[in-house]
Amino acid sequence: MNLEQLIKPDSVLCNAHARSKKHCLEILSELLSTTNPGVSNEEIFSRLVERERLGCTCLDKGSAFPHCRIDAIGQSSGALIKLSSPIDFDSSDGEFVDLVFGLMVPAEMDDSHYADTRLIAGLISDDALRGKLRAATSSRDLHETLISYAARTESDLPGRS
């Protein structure tokens, strides 16, 4: 799946106000449910929290990658949040998080779903992209920045060739 199919404009939020990691996961679950009306945001939130209990999904340098598996979907779906103020996400580097990429995948994953996971992980690890995303001032700008940057570098990202 390409990034434009994975992260739709309606699932991107710039300058969100999250009070805590839990609140951020609530916002993320609402975004993910907008493009997946058959799945409630409560179920997504529950699965995200369940996954966080297994280990923090923070990837350091102010970014996190909460993700979960959902029974009721057939394809991956992603979201992106840029927080107005960084929050404590229990990161190993001690840095607070302001960029949150969320992903839900089908409970039964195939190679394409693993590729979607690698794509998001590759994007998050890109210092230049994180800088550009942090400079975005609107949800539309945030989405366009993500999509255009990824299109230019797609062949260099893990899982893509």
Image (spheres, rainbow, N blue to C red):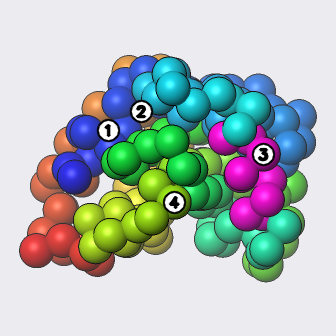
The crowd level at tag 2 (other Cα within 10 Å; few <14, some 14-19, many 20+) is many
Mark identifier at residue 145: 1
Of residues 79 and 46, the one nearer the viewer is 46
Q: CA distance from mark 3 to mark 4?
A: 14 Å
Looking at the picture, which amino acid does disc 2 mark?
Leu
Residue 144 percent coordinates (x, y): 29, 32
Q: Is residue 106 visible?
A: yes
First in sequence, mark 3 or 2: give its number.
Answer: 3
Left or right of 152: which side holds 136? right
* Residue at the disc numbered 3: 46
Looking at the picture, which amino acid does disc 4 mark?
Ala
Quarter where residue 40 is shown: top right
Q: Which secondary structure, mark 2?
A: helix
CB-based contact (under 8 Å), mark 4 and mark 2:
no
Looking at the picture, which amino acid does disc 3 mark?
Ser
* Residue at the disc numbered 4: 107
